[in-house]
Image: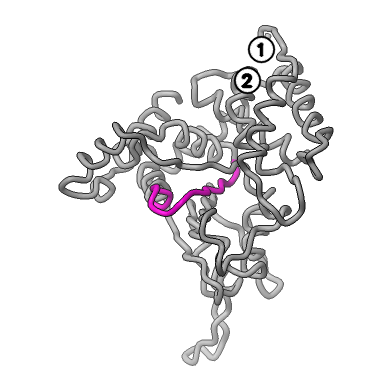
Amino acid sequence: MREDINKVLENVGKVIIGKKDVLEKLLAGLLADGHVLLEDVPGTGKTKLAKALSASLGVDFGRIQFTPDMLPADITGMHIYSRETEQFEWKEGPVFTNILLADEINRATPRTQAGLLECMEERQVTVDGETRKLAEPFFVIATQNPVETAGTFPLPEAQTDRFMMKLSMGLPDREEEIRILETYREKDPLLELNAVMTCEELIAVKRQAEKTYVHPLINGYLADIVLATRKQEKVVMGVSPRGTLALMRCCKALACMEGRDYVTPDDVKKLAPAVLAHRLVFSFGRSRQEEAVKLMEEILKSVPVPVEDFSRR
């Protein structure tokens, strides 16, 4: 399993330079059956990252460019009247894919954003009273620009909570910038990227990640961290049980990616800021991601770390 995961990381690394930590967390979110929100300034490679990941996994890829005039039916699909058959025929929307890039999701109205809620949570689409299941895997990578706020509609707290992780690509340093120039000097490496894992192999890795053992002390550690978020004076709303389960699933996926069949406290420490920070609400209607990440780091330092053999006995 670890060799297969490393192949994917190396393959995407041909396109995305110097962002291995972000890619590992993104892949953990996929294996944990979650969704990821990428928030960063334009031009940092968010869209290219999603395309490179889908190309490396050999799965179907779909992209939606969110705009203020979009409707939920533009996402899920609709019934269209056919003159030939004189009947309404079902036309699938772009959500019927494996990896869906929801580009600039905050540019659509709340009504349109809500069109993704059932897809993300239930892995299904219900239109005109008929429910259709989505393919496995179904992974949403949503992007938004934190700088340009004109004409945008911030995601409500309830919808932000549906994303398992919130990540930021970040700007490259000098050495990475030079490597980017050398890599893209002649042509885009994404055009020649081949799949190194099939959809069936990806599902098998997901099933293996689900079996990863979580020691009772780790469960207690997770609960202590989450309870600490609910006791902070600055926080209006702490992490819900959905966030606790999301952190556990992500830790199981990361452990599987690293070739272990059990979770350790280091897995929790590595993923807790990305999984829990965006769920902290300091004041309704305002996003304060940097402050939330710092608070999560302080909580991780204050909560006692269990010491034990965490493997299954």
- Identify residue type, mark 1: Phe
Residue range highlighted in magenta: 33-47
Q: Which residue is mark 2?
A: 263
- Residue at 52%, 48% in the rendered image: 38
Side of 61 relative to 31 (left or right)? left
Farthest residue in the left direction?
186
User: Where residue 253 sits: x, y (%)?
Assistant: 57, 30
- SS label for mark 1: loop
- Residue at 74%, 46% in the rendered image: 281
Disc 1 to disc 2: CB gap under 8 Å: yes
Q: CA distance from mark 1 to mark 2?
A: 7 Å
- SS label for mark 2: loop
Residue in the foreground of this view, choosing between 221 and 249: 221
User: Where residue 243 sits: x, y (%)?
Assistant: 72, 39
Report the quarter where the C terminus lies. Answer: top right
Q: Which residue is mark 1?
A: 310
- Identify residue type, mark 2: Val
Side of 302 relative to 41 (left or right)? right
- Residue at 54%, 87% in the rendered image: 81
